[in-house]
Amino acid sequence: MIGSKGVVMEIQKTASAGTTEKCDCLVTVSTGSGGRTVELKSKVLYEYGDRMVALVHHCLTQMGIQDALVEVEDMGAFDHILVARLQAAVYRSQDKTENIPWGDLLYE
């Protein structure tokens, strides 16, 4: 699958971004086993869980990632925090630290 920017990305190693502090989330990405899996732990799982999982899948699609395990430990983070943590974890998994298109996923 190719992302909206015409780029195919892969999770190369396990990486995390974020914290388990209030109003944040800890996102860990690792290579999947032939697809995308999102595991979500959240204190607001029943109210916003479906929305959060859909947002993670949307972002993975936009980044062109089709094989990944994404674990999210949410502590009440807003959407833009979840997106930023996911994006940071993906780029950390590739050891990419420069020229990261921060914000692209929020403004599509």
Image (spheres, rainbow, N blue to C red):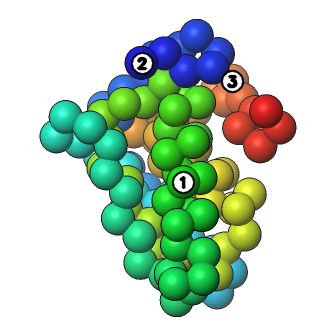
Quickly name the residue at label 1: 54
Are dots 3 and 2 in contact, CB under 8 Å?
no
Disc on res. 27: none
How many other residues sit within 10 Å of disc 3, few (<14), some (14-19) or many (≥20)?
few
Residue identified by numbered label 2: 1
Residue visible at 30% across and 34% down in the picture: 67
Choose the circle earlier in sequence order: 1 or 2.
2
> Label 1 amino acid?
Ala
- Check the image and report above or below for 10 versus 56: above
> Is 61 placed left or right of 48 in the picture?
left
Q: Quadrant of the N terminus?
A: top left
Q: Position of residue 78 (x, y in %)?
A: 72, 69
Of badges 3 and 1, the one in the foreground is 1
Amino acid under disc 3: Asn
Question: In this image, 77 relative to 65: left or right?
Answer: right
The residue pinned by badge 3 equals 99
